[in-house]
Amino acid sequence: MTSTPITPDDTLSNVEPFELAREAAAVIAEKTGIAHHDIALVLGSGWGGAADILGETVAEIPSHEIPGFSKPAVHGHVGTLRSIRIPETGKTALVLGSRTHLYEGKGVRTVVHGMRTAAAAGCTQVILTNGCGGLNLDWAPGTPVLIRDHINLTANSPIEGANFVDLTDLYTQRLRDLAHSVDASLSEGVYAQFRGPHYETPAEVKMAGVIGADLVGMSTTLEAIAARQAGMEILGISLVTNLAAGISPVPLSHQEVIEAGQAAGPRISALLAEIAKRM
Ligand code: 8IG
């Protein structure tokens, strides 16, 4: 059987997603010279600085050079994949600086391609980070919160076919305990993913609170599901960059979101690096 070479421009819809992930992992191995990565790191809004203090960057690849990855759509998101050697453990982290959001309209396969690629590259653990809105008035902008569980409000799933993946302990107690060993004061919350890209109305935020959410955002849940399907252990950390709509008396602005991320940057970067060093 002949196979067509897969290029970065291929639309995911024509390609079996796990095959494309293996192709991407092979390109990563070739371009980084690292045959096997251990920990995947997805850096969301506000988290971009964490990679710099994690260890030695062994390689950096523009994400569009890797099959199935595209350039990031959001200002403030970084479009590279980095291989970082963590000196304390000798493990190698695969840092995914670019994330495709569901609201970009490229489909769920594209959204979770990074997770499937990380798994194909050998990663058995992933830290998913994001910037989000908070429902708890105690969480000032700049507060990191561990994701205890999620509510997927996208009406979508990365799982195709009758494959009933168990999501009990999705954000594992073990990794949350590990995070608490770094900072015992870390709060935990339930993260609700809306499709976006608009922020919620105050009524939608109120609904999210009623059904059990503490955090609202536009990422993470579909990735976590795909990561679990791929057998990875997951830690989720949100950075509350703003109070959710209606919780705060002032309207949300993307500029404020970026500024809150920048202000919290050094502290959350140190937190993330310290957690990754214990994994
Ligand atoms: I940063 O308030 C950030 N991302 N849905 N709501 C949603 N996503 C967000 C928010 C928010 N803040």
Image: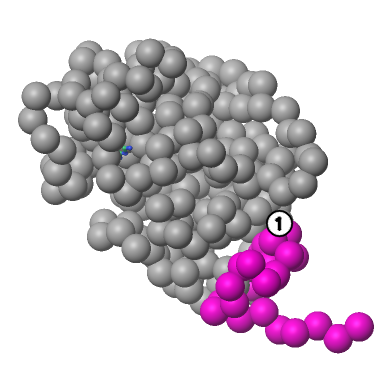
> In this orientation, which residue lies closer to the viewer: 86 or 7?
7
Q: Quadrant of residue 210?
A: top left
Q: Is residue 39 above or below residue 142?
A: below
> In this orientation, which residue lies closer to the viewer: 225 or 145?
225
> In this orientation, which residue lies closer to the viewer: 251 or 174?
251
Q: Quadrant of residue 268?
A: top left
Q: Which residue is mark 1?
A: 120
Q: Residue at x 36, y 26 (%)?
A: 215
Which quadrant, please, contains the C terminus? top right
**Percent x, y for residue 50?**
36, 45
Q: Residue at x 26, y 57 (%)?
A: 76
Q: Is residue 232 left or right of residue 99?
A: right
Q: Is residue 218 left or right of residue 75?
A: right
* Any part of residue 92 in sight: no
Which of the four quarters of the rendered structure image does ligand 1 lie in?
top left
Q: Residue at x 50, y 47 (%)?
A: 41
Q: Is residue 32 above or below residue 166?
A: below
Q: Which residues are magenta?
A: 1-28
Q: How many marks are shown on the rendered structure? A: 1
Q: Is residue 238 magenta?
A: no
Q: Residue at x 45, y 59 (%)?
A: 105
**Percent x, y for residue 115?**
60, 50
Q: Is residue 10 left or right of residue 246?
A: right
In terms of secondary structure, where does tag 1 sit? helix
